[in-house]
Amino acid sequence: MGKLRVMIMGITRMPTSGLYQLMSWMSPSYPVGSYTYSHGVEYAVEAGLVLGADDLVLWLKDILQFGGARTDVILLVEAYRAFQGKDKSAIVEIAELGYATRSTREFELETTAQGRAFVDVTQKVAPSSSLEMLLREWDGPIVYPIAVAAVAADNEIALVDVLTAYLHSFVSNIVSAAVRIIPLGQTDGQKSIGALEEVTSVQVQEALSLTIDDIGTATLMMDWCSSQHETQYTRLFRS
């Protein structure tokens, strides 16, 4: 049945190979350095804005609904469709826009460093024709969600699955940082991830119907924390 979805006992399932690859790409063990970033949460903790699990969940909800995570999934959807259609001009436009939409230097570092690392390791492990096309057509920095979109499109993994895995990974990385910074217990960390399931699901469904014209953020406090983190005296994370 190739890469088509199959029906087993009435349940639609992703082909095992696609699921396996997606889990590998979004795993903390995939060497993109995601564990070194806190997305500004490190300074938010120092400033007394995030003091526990409840604060963390509210903070992450805002990022998912109004911040960088929302921008990422819109870019991912648009890039995925452009890669599927081999639309080189659209791919360049999305790559340029993805880089231009970062509101602070550290957010730019976070997404481009991970994007570069993702491209490097993926091309060595499982070369992607879409990544090769992206590298030929665009000579600027590659943001993380666009790199993920390229390999997902090549492997025909359903967008809803890619977006869900991407946002789960995003949330999990920040929660992992918060567990170390606040500090937060491992159980509270997992509860925080669980509490964000519904908003994540909503954002995935919304992203499927949005376009690059819908990109925009309204998370000024996150941007401020990111800017302050750049000069924070003692810090564990790069953002």
Image: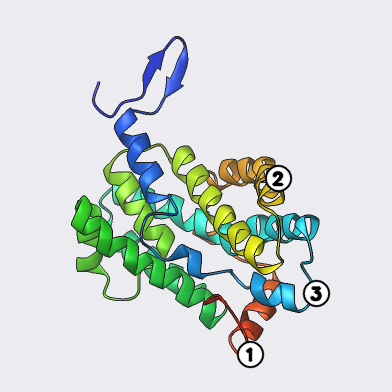
In depth, the one of 182 and 211 nearer the eye is 182
The residue indicated by pointer 3 is 48
The residue identified by callout 1 is: 233
Q: Amino acid at mark 1?
A: Tyr
In the rendered image, residue 1, in percent from the top left (x then y), is placed at 25, 20
Question: Which residue is located at x 55 percent, y 76 percent?
Answer: 239
The reply, left or right, for residue 4 in relation to residue 78 is: left
**Up/down of 2 relative to 107, above or below:** above
The disc, 2 or 3, on the residue closer to the chain's N-terminal end is 3
Is 4 positioned to the left or the right of 104 in the image?
Answer: left
Residue 237 percent coordinates (x, y): 55, 75
Q: Is residue 51 left or right of residue 74?
A: right
Which of the 4 image quarters holds residue 225? bottom right
Residue with the mark numbered 2: 191
Residue lying furthest top: 9
Which type of secondary structure does the marked residue at label 3 adopt? loop
Q: x, y (%) of residue 207?
A: 55, 48
Confirm or deny contact between disc 3 and disc 1 (CB under 8 A): no
Is the C-beta separation of discs 2 and 1 under 8 Å? no
Amino acid beneath label 3: Gly
Q: At 61% across and 47% down in the image, what residue appears?
A: 203
Residue 104 found in image quarter: bottom right
Q: In the rendered image, is residue 93 in sight?
A: no
**What's the CA distance linking mark 3 and mark 1?**
16 Å
Depth check: 34 or 67 in front?
34
